[in-house]
Amino acid sequence: MELKKVTLHTVHEQLGAKMVPFAGFSMPLKYSSDIEEHTCVRNGVGIFDVSHMGEFLVEGEKALDLLQYITSNDVSKLKNGQAQYSYFPNDTGGIIDDILVYKHNDTKYMVVVNASNIEKDWKWICKQNHFGATVHNISDSLSLFAVQGPKACLCLQSITEIHLESIPYYHFAIGNIGGIEDVVISATGYTGAGGFELYVKNEYAAHLWNAILACGKTFHIQPIGLGARDTLRLEMGYCLYGNDIDETTSPIEAGLTWVTKFTKKFINDAFLLRQKERGVEKKLVGILMEERSIPRSHYEIYNLQNECIGTITSGCYSPTLQRGIAMGYVKNIFSKLDTEVFIKIREKFVRAKITKTPFLQMK
């Protein structure tokens, strides 16, 4: 199957990006080095093109009813201009996708989904739409840029009259930035470094990208690839769909009880409530390497008695901590903080311990 290309595909090639297949798209993995780009975002500001993400509009008088039924979080709590992390539960105890829900007003919402799940999610929403809500798949018409880092606000403020600091975390404004109208400016991100995500129509994508790079020169902005995006999100303990959560993983086991609201009716809520009340056999935990080694997905986790107690789902070298970190599922009885474990890396057993996430405590 031919890979899809984001609107600025040629721009990324011209910038020297290493392009790789990801979620059905040709995407920039890195422009310089993963560690350099990671450090740039943690200490300054970087810009990601994440236009591969999917966006759906859910509109009409029954929009809320549909979203309440198909998502785990309580959409009725959203105020206009607020965003919410949530997920689509399936009917077998797993997760179809983790998502963001944006409330424009009482009859208009935007749902942002993972690139690899756009078609699956769209079919699921349409299948469950017994409520008569109006749904539109606008994924192919929008570009999405994530401007992330402690200097992101200062950088972007020079090209907009919207007071960015007044946008609370997980809220958004719509307005002019870089001379482009109707851009959704969202105080969200996948890095834990602060910043904004900007949703812009494809025809204005190049103009906005260039405006951000121009205003960011003072702050030494760099384009950032998927490699650094992964290490940044893992330092914060954020789940990656397809690694840490999927159709077979329980949201209760994955620690997503905080976005699972049993005060309303939603798909498979009774099953998940029973799981919550009875407890689960395994949990997603953070793992900190005690020896010099890099844990990777699918590596096995062992206890002190040399019994396999779980599997790593995401792992990397943390440029900030300068040591290996990972997330993985372990039997519940071994999930207590500071429990000593071993990671089997090839034929060697490497010391590690269970730790809390996020791995970094951001200011």
Image: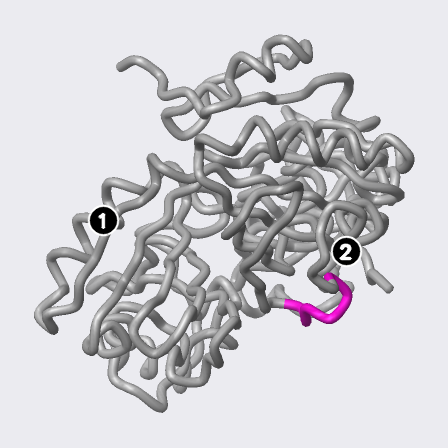
Query: Quadrant of the rendered structure where residue 169 is?
Result: bottom right
Dividing the image into 4 quarters, which one contains the C terminus?
bottom right
Asked whether, in this view, residue 33 is left or right of residue 102, the answer is right
Range shown magenta: 164-169
Viewer-closest of 226 and 60: 60
> What secondary structure is marked by label 1?
helix
**Residue at (25, 84) in percent of width and height:** 265
Name the residue nearer the viewer: 328 or 20: 20
- Measuring from the top left, give residue 67's x and y in whole percent: 28, 71
Residue 83 visible here: yes
| Residue tagged 1 | 122
Q: Nearer the viewer, residue 68 or 295?
A: 68
Q: Amino acid at mark 1?
A: Trp
- Residue 271 visible in image: no
**Disc 2: which residue:** 359
Q: Residues within 10 Å of mark 2 (few under 14, many from 20)?
A: some
Q: Position of residue 288 (x, y in %)?
A: 77, 49
- Residue 124 vs 114, above or below: the answer is below
Q: Earlier in the sequence, mark 2 or mark 1?
A: 1
Give the percent coordinates (x, y) of residue 233. Answer: 66, 47
Residue 37 colored magenta? no
